Image (cartoon, rainbow, N blue to C red):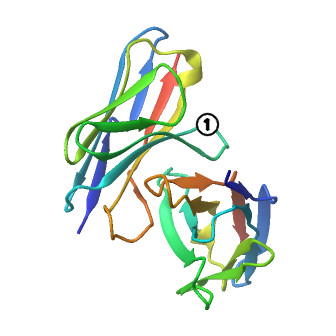
Amino acid sequence: SQTIHQWPATLVQPVGSPLSLECTVEGTSNPNLYWYRQAAGRGLQLLFYSVGIGQISSEVPQNLSASRPQDRQFILSSKKLLLSDSGFYLCAWRGGAGSSYEQYFGPGTRLTVT
Amino acid sequence: AQKITQTQPGMFVQEKEAVTLDCTYDTSDQSYGLFWYKQPSSGEMIFLIYQGSYDEQNATEGRYSLNFQKARKSANLVISASQLGDSAMYFCAMFRPRSARQLTFGSGTQLTVLP
């Protein structure tokens, strides 16, 4: 069965510090991968998605970036965090072409920028 | 552009009763899909149910059913025989067929099941 991991689970970082959040998927090949952010009490905002290694699409211009160095690894990064980057970050996957449409989410990372 | 609207920020239901969570959507696509996710206080998003735009019958998964009214562009979630563990945030979402099928989410409904 498929499993999705995210780490760290929680993170407190000062403004201006770098960020690296990692997401890995097990039990599937060539998944579509997604990064979402959820502000407190709000819905999910899609940040990035990837349909393959090295292929990244950005939905919202910001000081965040994403990379996909391996088929089942998706990384969210920032060189300098802003206070507005605080939130709950969720990674998700779904199968590639021909797969069902639902996305499956990881446990999330709670980021607090101080 | 796709848009999902959930007009109930909070709902209360008595244990063992049924509850309906509202969702309306707007799209110009003929082919699309609608989802419901549950988010408990732990934060993880749990997939509940899916309805395709061409599906003739309403989707059901255990105690969850999706009341799909295409002409009204509504996709309400019905939870039968509510349980205390159903207390959570519920999100309606729609997939976009032309863009790697990522999802557009509504703002959510906080459901509280009362004992």
Residue B66 quadrant: bottom right
Quarter in which the C terminus of chain B is drawn = bottom right
Q: Can residue B113 be seen in this view?
A: yes
Please say if A102 is above or below A65: below
Q: Can residue B115 be seen in this view?
A: no
Residue at the image point whose x is 19% and y is 58% from the top: A29
Please say if B52 is above or below A112: below
Residue at the image point whose x is 48% and y is 63% from the top: B46
Please say if B50 is above or below A80: below
Please say if B19 is above or below A47: below
- Pinpoint residue A97: horizontal percent, then vertical percent: 32, 64
Q: In this figure, which residue is indicated by the disc labeled 1?
A: A39
Mark 1: which amino acid?
Ala
- Pinpoint residue B57: horizontal percent, then vertical percent: 61, 91
- Pinpoint residue A93: horizontal percent, then vertical percent: 36, 55
Residue at the image point whose x is 78% and y is 78% from the top: B71
Using the image as rendered, state which of residue B37 and residue B73 is in the foreground: B73
A19 vs B23, left or right, is: left
